[in-house]
Image (spheres, helix red, strand yellow):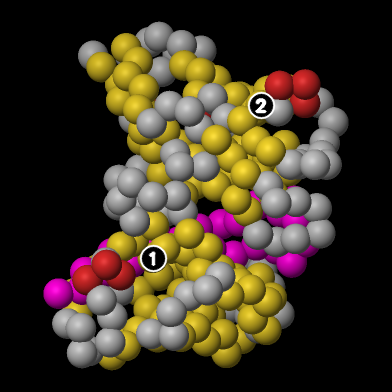
Amino acid sequence: AQSVTQPDIHITVSEGASLELRCNYSYGATPYLFWYVQSPGQGLQLLLKYFSGDTLVQGIKGFEAEFKRSHSSFNLRKPSVHWRDAAEYFCAVGAHGYSTLTFGKGTMLLVSP
Amino acid sequence: ETGVTQTPRHLVMGMTNKKSLKCEQHLGHNAMYWYKQSAKKPLELMFVYSLEERVENNSVPSRFSPECPNSSHLFLHLHTLQPEDSALYLCASSPRDRGGNEQFFGPGTRLTVL
């Protein structure tokens, strides 16, 4: 069975600084990987996804993520954080042939002025 | 209206009430999901429907009863809930019941059980 670990429960970043959110997964084959963002009181919005091919994936809102098979990681990055990016971020893994996703516990991003 | 919609957005109910949550997707998808999101806990998958057939039930108590009358609509019927069932209930849909397809989420129903 697959699993996802997001080691950081909270992260605080200054506005304009760079951001990296960590995600480690456990799965025996090539996984499908996703990052979602959730603003307070809202559902989850897909930021980006990795299925195959180029290991550096570009998403919406200026986010990118890099798949590193050797590290079993799929870290999310943004070069310059805006106050609007304050939200909770979820990494998820899916398996080929199944519709369900396994989510991490989430990382809450706080942006300081 | 586009995307995945959920009604009501907020619901307060007593433990003896019966209520239903509704989810509707306008994306032409044929798989739909119910999730429970509680504070400080990971997202919990409750039910999966594919082509209107329930394909997954993750040991959810029988006081939660899903219904999928067609590929666009999904309901969660609630009865005799407990206070620990208070949570955000999220509905999602995806294009087909194969892995690799991202799920599209609704805004959720915030449920409070008194």
**Magenta residues, as a range?**
B92-114
Q: Residue at x 22, y 71 (%)?
A: B83
Q: Say which residue appears at 38% left-offset and 50% top-offset.
A: B41
Q: Image quadrant for the C terminus of chain A? A: top left
Q: Which residue is mark 2?
A: A73
Q: Is residue A44 above or below residue B98?
A: above
Q: Residue at x 74, y 42 (%)?
A: A27
Q: Decide which of A61, B32 is in the foreground and name it.
A: B32
Q: Considering only vertical position in the picture, is A49 above or below B84?
A: above
Q: Nearer the viewer, mark 1 or mark 2?
A: 2
Q: Tell me the quarter of the picture where residue A58 sits.
A: top right
Name above or below for residue B60 compared with residue B86. Answer: below
The disc label shown at residue A89, or none: none
Residue B7 point in image, percent of width and height: 35, 74
Residue at the disc numbered 1: B89
Q: Residues within 10 Å of mark 1 (few under 14, many from 20)?
A: many
Disc 2 residue type?
Ser
On screen, residue B29 versus residue A42, left or right, reads right
**Three-letter amino acid code at the position of disc 1:** Tyr
Which of the 4 image quadrants contains residue A49? top right
- Asked whether, in this view, residue A35 is left or right of residue A10, the answer is right
For this orientation, the residue located farthest to the top is: A17
Residue B14 locus on image (x, y percent): 17, 82
Find residue B105 and report its horizontal and vertical position in percent.
50, 58
Task: Check residue B67 for magenta coloring.
Answer: no
Residue B29 visible? The answer is yes
Give the Cα separation between the discs numbered 1 and 2.
29 Å
Image point 54% across, 25% down: which residue? A22
Residue A84 shows in this picture: no
Q: Can marks 1 and 2 be said to lie on one chain?
A: no
Chain to which mark 1 belongs: B
**Secondary structure beneath disc 1?**
strand
